[in-house]
Structures are given as structure tokens and as C-alpha cells.
Image: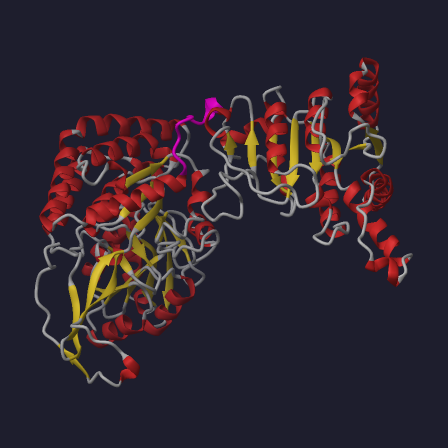
Amino acid sequence: MDSTRAFVKNVRRVVVKVGTAVVTRDDGRLAVGRLGAIFEQLEKLNSRGFEIILVTSGAVGAGRQRLKYRKMINSSFADLQKPQVELDGKACAAVGQNGLMALYDTLFSQLDVTSSQLLVTDNDFKNADFRVQLTRTVDSLLDLRSIPIFNENDAISTRRAPYEDSSGIFWDNDSLAALLAMELKADLLVLLSDVDGLYSGPPSDPRSKLIHTYIKQKHQKAISFGDKSRMGRGGMDAKVKAAVNAAYSGTPVVIASGYVPNNIIKVLNGECVGTLFHKDAHMWIPVTEVSPHEVAVSAREASRRLQALTSEERKKILLDVASALEANEHFIMLENDADVEAARDAGYDEALVARLALKPSKIRALAESVRRLAEMEEPIGQVLKRTELAEGLILEKKSCPLGVLLIVFESRPDALVQISSLAIRSGNGLLLKGGKEAKRSNAILHKVITSAIPETVGAKLIGLLTTREEIPELLKLDDVIDLVIPRGSNKLVSQIKSSTKIPVLGHSDGICHVYVDKAANLEMAKKIVLDAKTDYPAACNAMETLLVHKDLMANGGLQELVKELEQEGVTLFAGPRVNGVVSFSRANTFHHEYNSKACTIEIVKNVDEAIEHIHSYGSSHTECIVTDNQEVAEHFLNRVDSAAVFHNASTRFCDGARFGLGAEVGISTSKIHARGPVGVEGLLTTRWVLRGQGQVVEGDKGVVYTHKDLLMSNGCNGH
């Protein structure tokens, strides 16, 4: 549940208002399918014990459509050539209300729900006795599980014209819904519209952003509205006024789309849908809060300033970051200790706590890795290919930063340091969202690192996001963010991949295998298997499945491997072929990442069966073969389709620092752009630079193409 929507747990009485744009189609006819979907939601909520009050618009529009059709049918051809007089709005309301309620009654009857109609006018609410009786009648209907349906009685309203007069106690059905929510003491008002909620500008403007929580002090004067409703008298301006009135009188309001399936149920389930209006909203979110879009744009602008620096200036920033980490070790440890203690108190498993914990030695190692990164060859502006297209026309392919990276990671605060230093080295802007369990550690590390970034670049180069609610908005920013790298659970990666158009780089599981061949040196195999599993069991490159050649079951090799693992406290699970040979529990599935001192063991007939098993149950991360048979080893290395494949070496070597990359933003199992540990090179792309002397194409008549490869000069042109 979204933290700002926690109040819905206490909601019982709900007013739902459907606007004209929701009730009718573009041609003015009633949107029967859309209304049916909305009514199905109301029926479900009614059966769950919610008290539902419906306020509807659309009578005037529906009546106008019907009367226009009737008038056309009854007119001669000569009549149709004459200028058409606008139909009387009150007559349209009378005809439309009849048809509207007939449809509503039919739809609700199909769902076995009783509905009731209450038509009101502005003058009614001036009568105190009317208001008392209104409350009694509605309470009685709700007790009977009937859904009251309200509409303004436009047919007999004393307004000059329903579309012009905005005076009185209420002036349209949005303000009527707000008035009823207050009068009938509703716990929530939902205003359904034809857009997703309130935007910072006209929804048709691509620069406009959805506002999830309205804060009066922040948004009241900062929002510009677009056109009014397609058919009704209001529009978003009217909805906001009604929502503010109701919210600041004590009834929370959500403006959401009536076009999106199950939106009402989503609101009542506490999901972040539409725009919330609440009198306490200013206490939840700082009035000065910067939107996710502004954070992303600021990172992009700062990255361009970073790219304009010389190589030595960028190198100095990294050296300053390393020094700042060491100088602030005490403060970093205090915040990290608090996170670890809170995680244990919350009952997190030890694997997560292990990933969360920092030690002084770890901080010093991080500082050293940043220094090594600083000393690496300058990655930006490297000439990768140089070609003479024609005489005096030279084309260069050069390395350049991707732009802005969004990294979503869980648990490990040390990842923040690695990712930030890689972003600086590669000239990229960076947006970081860490797990809530590492909130304090991430905050202090972000503060320490950004304090080392000079003002000429700006601390906004690296933005730290603090709430989960910001992620969906960021994932929409494909015009600003260039790459998303999720580091975490399979669920996290899958959710992100399905929620964005931005390219996603990462892996969803770390199911790594070690295959011990019949020709393996058993003592070597023991060392590799133990290291792959116990060096850091929570790492994504730790062994999760041990595959053993069948001959080792007969000669005792399997039992020796099992003994070594059990002595180190590893919990073992058996595959079908191992079950019964040794006494431990059977594995439920081969596709499982333990992230702890546990692993699965299975027997295979030969190297090809080992390869087949890896392809069937692995995650294309890191695989190892232990054997002294070079031919078998080469067969394994060439056939296994994973990001990293090793011979006689622990899977734990699959790491950016150990590969000499300085650090890594993660290990990618994707095949596009970067694969395996992703260091600086994986955060770069290329661009083409063409230098000429006035050449023009002119139908290729005046150009003699040579396409000659030229020697590449070292260096990066001053950058």
C-alpha cells in the first residue's frame, strides 16, 4: 500500500462521481461498456460492505443526442437546410435523465444491485429540513444496501443556463459531489475523469507531469489547466476546486481515470492511482519537494557539465570521493549500524542483513576501488575507429556517455558507492533508488559523495530517491533517462521491465552452477566448490547448484564433496538422482537462488547433460567446470550460453573489481549492449564525428569514396 494512501484502511462510505466524458462516448451516445465496467466495481465494493453513493453527469448530453436524432427524423429535407436552433438545455436534461436512469437500473439489475434516484437542485440545500431529511433517506437506503444515484435536476433548475451559471451552493456535479461528501459525512470522494488525474499542465502537453499528491501551498498557483470537459460544463479546473473544498473540510478526494479498468477498486486498495487531495498532505511531502522529472533533468544537465571537464578534472573528483569516504568512515558506520539493527528488529533474514552490513575494512576497500577507477584510462572521447571516406573527409567513431542512468537496488549500500563512482568516471548523470532497509546508509553515502563534486558540475549529478512512489513516474521518462539497471530480486527486475519503455540492463536471478567432471582433481574441486558457495553466500555469483558426474557417486567423490560442504555449515538439498544416495532433503525445484549457506546437488551422466541442465534451470549468469580434461573443458566453455563461463576457477571471480573493471553497476545476463560484469565500458555508447573540407553529396557524383581504414591516434582530444 502506498504510504500516502494508508487512510483508505478506515474508509467505509464512498461518494463516486462519474463525469460526462466518462458517461458518454465521443459521439455523444452513452458509453455502455465503460459504464458496465464501473458498475461492476461498485457492485464488488457494495458486496464487500462499502457504502456507495453515486453522483452522475451526462443527462444533458444524452438528451441532446436523442433529441437531435428525433428532430432529424421528423424534419423535411428543406428543414435540414435551414440554420439549426440550439436545443433547450432543460428539455435535453429531462429527456436524458430518463434514459440515463433506465440504463443505470438495467445495469445494476443485471448485477443484482438495487439502485435509487435522487434529483436535487441548488435551492434544495438552502432548506435545513431538506438537508436533515436527505441524510435520513440516504442512511436508510445504504442500510438496505441500495446505491443512491444523485444528479442535479437541470430540467427544473432556476439557473439561467446550466453551462453558464456558476453561482449558488453548488454549480455543477463536481461541486455537488463535494457537497454531498461533506453533507453525508463520506470517508472518501472519488471523481472519475477522462484523464489519469491532475497534471502540472494540459495533459496533452508532453511536458506535463501527473501530480500524485496535491499540496495546496505548492500547486495552487503553479498549475495551468487545459480545455474544459468535452461535453460537461466543468473540466479539471472544476474538479480541483471541488476536491480542494471537500478535502480541506475533512473528506479525502482522489481524481482518477474512469477509463482504466478497476481504478475505483485500486484506489480503495491503497494503490497510488490518480491525484490525492488530503488536508494533511503538506505534512507527508515537503512543499519544496522536487519532482522526479526535475531530478532527472538536473542530473542530465550536470552530466553535460561533467563531460565538459578535462580528464584530469574528472579524475580529481573521484580521488576526492575516495578521500571523503575515508574521512567520514565513523559517520557512515553509525548510520549503517542503525540500519542493521533496525533490519534485525524487523525480522529480516540473515542473508539480507549480511548484504546490508558495512565494515570499516569494506569502506576502505571501497575507497581504494574508487582510486583504481580514477587511475584507469580515460573512457570518454576515445577514438574507436577512424576511416577516410573520401579525400579530405575523415570519419571517427568515438566513445561517449549514455546520458542519465536510473539504478534501482536492494539492500547493499556499498553498491551506491560503486555505481556513483562509475557514473562519474563515465560522465553519466545518475538517479539512485535504494532499498528502505538501507535508507540511512544510502543517505550518508550520498551526502559524502556529492559533497566531493565541485560546484562547476553540481551535486545534482547524482540524485537519491527516497520513496517507492517516485519509481513509476521515473520509468515514464524515456525522454530523459537513457538506461535503467535494476539490482535485486527477480520480482523487482520483472516489474521494472514490464513498466517502462526505457532500455533495461540487468539480471533477475543468480543461479550459478559448478560442474565437477569425472576427470576433476578432487582436492581442487573441494576448494572451488567451498569458495563458490561459502565465500559470500548472499552474492549473485555464489554457487546455487552443484552438478557432479555420475562416476563420482561410485568412487566416493560425491560423498567427499558433501562432507566438505556440511562441515562448513551448508544445508544441502538433493536432486532426484541424488535422493537416497545421501540423506538430505529433496529440492523442490532446480531454479532456485538460496542467497544463503544452502545449495542443490544433482548427478549428471556427462558434460553434455550438465550443459543441458544449466540451460534448462540456470539464469545465464556464471557457470564453472572443474576438470583436468582440456577437451571437455573447451567443449563446456564453448557450449554454455551464460554471461561468464569458467574452467577450474570459482564463480566468485565474476565481479567487476576482480575483472579489473574498477567496479560494477551490476552483472548483466542480457545479450544486448553489455553482458557480464558491467563497468565503465558498459555505461558508454558511441557517436560519429565527420570532418570535411566543404564536401557535398550531390547525388554522389562529385565524391570518390575510398573507405580507407586509418591508424587511430591515442588520447581523447583533451577530454
**Residue 645 placement (x, y as % from top left):** 26, 65
Inspect this view and state whether residue 384 appears. yes
Would you say 140 lies left or right of 414 here? right
- Along the viewing direction, whichever of 92 and 301 lies nearer the viewer: 92
Any magenta on residue 287?
yes
Residue 309 in the image: state x and y as whole percent: 15, 47
> Residue at (75%, 43%) from the top-left corner?
39
Identify which residue is drawn at 74% across, 46% down: 35
* Most foreground residue, 111 or 78: 78
Main secondary structure type of the part rendered in magenta:
loop
Image quadrant in which you'd find residue 637: bottom left
User: How many labels sit on residues?
Assistant: 0
Colouring scheme applied when the structure was drawn: secondary structure
Q: Position of residue 172 (x, y in %)?
A: 71, 32
Q: Judge whether residue 266 is colored magenta.
A: no
* Residue 556 in view of the camera: no
Question: Within the image, what quadrant is residue 72 found in?
Answer: bottom right
Q: Is residue 528 above or below residue 295?
A: below
Q: In the rendered view of the protein, which quadrant contains the C terminus? A: bottom left
x, y percent for residue 375: 9, 50
Q: Which residues are magenta?
A: 282-291
- In the image, 419 versus 104, the foreground residue is 104
* Residue 629, above or below 674: below
Q: Where is 627 relative to 140, above or below?
A: below
- As drawn, is 87 to the left or to the right of 576? right
